[in-house]
């Protein structure tokens, strides 16, 4: 329960990918991790702890092993910092009758109907001008704590078929969020400037996500379940972070790493996404710094494993026909090994056996998931990271309900199970 509460607190403090990395850095620094800048020369020491970020929303942290990477390789846990939702447009203010609305763009694949009638606000980063040169600007994190927007539902009297046909919104015309009365004199850019305590003219750009201001909570007769936004996939990030910290007092031969990427929900094809060069760049630099020889990095990769962690679909008692009958992960039943023969997940017999052995040694229950053969299977950062790096990989995740809702649900006990399994993976 304590670790589950820490997870809820971590998510509540991380309403955007940029805040998630900021929260991660705060925990890493408490445990003695030192920052490395990609644009600077790296000097690494065995046993030391480091982290580096790319564009403020992707981060890789690692602990240098007691042996060179060519001898023992890497143990890497990958996850992602972003979640599907709504993002504010560059010129969002829209006057519609007596009201001012904010235009939004759909990011990834959220369950849009779940954003209706929620207490919504904004969080993200804003670029602020600091001088006269073309690169004279800096990023500031912005979080507005109180609810300032809403997507009100249409009354059932005006939408009689909503319960039979489902709640749907036209992304252009019906998703803009109610912000204020048009004659209130409220200026959105001015509000952002006021919260950041800068001149409005200093604001050059922003990336702002819509988030639910309601904090995470436990529910159920025995408080066995948790609910929050962004469980997919900040729960995996938090579990990996705690697992890494749990192993810090036990020096390992292999270099341990956690890699959290942005842009997974939109395909990962970016400079800081899992389909970009970030992980390969960092591993190459570690090998080049700690190893000699032109073949050392290839040896390191051959000695390495990666665990791709992303949340899994739990069996839903109200929609039993959506699940494969012989593979039905249960919430609070332990980590789920995700398997797909078409490589939407990277798990193979070798890496599956490794994870099963780790769970059995740690006395952690485990489950296996295969999608229904007549339903398309989702994917993760696993396949693209494995293809980019050449590292043997598997896909796992904790079971959850309502994936991509603004209010998701999972199991309180499962978080502890995953942390223990991940710690065992890092030690192997």
Image (tube, rainbow, N blue to C red):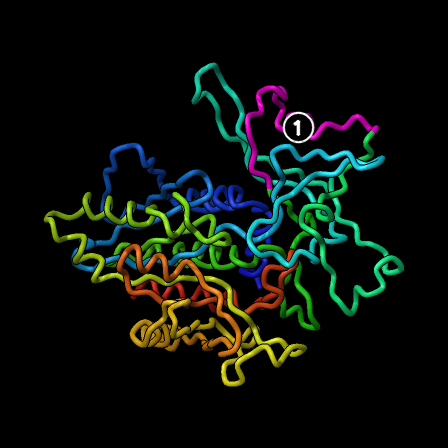
Residue visible at 25% across and 34% down in the picture: 41
Q: Is residue 179 above or below residue 400?
A: above
In the depicted view, which residue is nearer to us: 242 or 85?
85
Q: Quadrant of the C terminus?
A: bottom left
* 223 shown above or below 100: below
Seen at 77% across and 42% down, the residue is: 178
Q: Is residue 162 above or below residue 354?
A: above
Check disc 1 and report the residue beneath it: 189
Residue lying furthest top in this view?
A: 132
Tell me if mark 1 has few (under 14), some (14-19) or many (20+) residues whose alpha carbon lies within 10 angstroms of its own.
Answer: some
In the rendered view, does 236 fall on the left or right side of 114?
left
> Magenta includes 187?
yes
Residue 368, given in percent of the width and then of the height, sits at: 45, 77
Taking 303 as reference, is 156 left or right? Answer: right
Q: Quadrant of the N terminus?
A: bottom right
Look at the image and say whether residue 138 sits in the magenta stretch. Answer: no
Image: magenta residue range: 183-208
Residue in front for this viewpoint, 355 or 321: 321
The residue drawn where x is 67% and y is 49% is: 171
Above or below, 260 relative to 341: above
Q: Residue furthest left?
A: 293
What residue is shown at x 86% (from left), y 60% (from top)? 156
Residue 42: x and y in percent read 25, 37
Taking depth in this image into account, of 88 and 66 the one nearest to the observer is 88
x and y percent of residue 197 in the render?
63, 24
């Amino acid at each position: 329960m304590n670790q589950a509460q820490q997870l809820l607190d971590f998510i509540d403090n991380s309403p955007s990918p940029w805040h998630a990395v900021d929260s991660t850095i705060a925990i890493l620094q408490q445990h003695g991790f030192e920052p490395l800048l990609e644009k600077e020369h790296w000097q690494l020491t065995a046993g030391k702890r480091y982290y580096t970020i790319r564009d403020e929303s992707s981060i890789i942290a690692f602990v240098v092993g007691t042996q060179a990477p060519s001898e023992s390789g890497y143990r890497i846990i990958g996850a992602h910092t972003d979640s599907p939702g709504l993002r504010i447009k560059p010129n969002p203010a829209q006057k519609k009758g007596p009201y001012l609305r904010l235009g939004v763009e759909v990011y990834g694949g959220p369950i849009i109907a779940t954003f209706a009638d929620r207490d919504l606000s904004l969080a993200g980063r804003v670029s602020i001008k600091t001088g006269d040169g073309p690169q004279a600007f800096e990023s500031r994190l912005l979080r507005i704590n109180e609810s300032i927007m809403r997507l009100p539902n249409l009354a059932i009297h005006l939408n009689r078929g909503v319960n039979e046909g489902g709640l749907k919104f036209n992304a252009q015309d019906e998703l803009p969020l109610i912000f204020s009365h048009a004659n209130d004199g409220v200026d959105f850019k001015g509000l952002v400037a006021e919260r950041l305590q800068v001149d409005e003219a200093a604001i050059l750009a922003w990336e702002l996500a819509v988030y639910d201001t309601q904090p995470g909570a436990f529910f159920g007769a025995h408080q066995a379940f948790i609910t929050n936004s962004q469980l997919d996939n900040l729960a995996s990030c938090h579990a990996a972070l705690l697992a890494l910290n749990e192993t810090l007092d036990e020096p390992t031969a292999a270099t341990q790493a956690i890699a959290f990427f942005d842009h997974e929900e939109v395909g990962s094809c970016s400079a800081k996404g899992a389909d970009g060069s970030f992980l390969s760049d960092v591993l190459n630099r570690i090998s080049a710094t700690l190893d000699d020889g032109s073949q050392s990095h290839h040896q390191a990769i051959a000695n390495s494993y990666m665990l791709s962690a992303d949340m899994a679909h739990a069996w839903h008692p109200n929609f039993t026909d959506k699940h494969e009958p012989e593979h039905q992960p249960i919430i609070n039943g332990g980590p789920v090994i995700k398997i797909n023969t078409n490589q939407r997940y990277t798990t193979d017999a070798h890496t599956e056996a490794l994870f099963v052995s780790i769970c059995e040694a740690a006395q952690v229950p485990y489950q296996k998931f295969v999608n229904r053969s007549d339903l398309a299977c989702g994917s993760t950062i696993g396949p693209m990271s494995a293809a980019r790096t050449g590292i043997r990989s598997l896909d796992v995740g904790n079971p959850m309900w309502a994936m991509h809702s603004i209010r998701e649900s999972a199991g309180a006990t499962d978080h502890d199970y995953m942390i223990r399994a991940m710690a065992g993976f890092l030690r192997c």
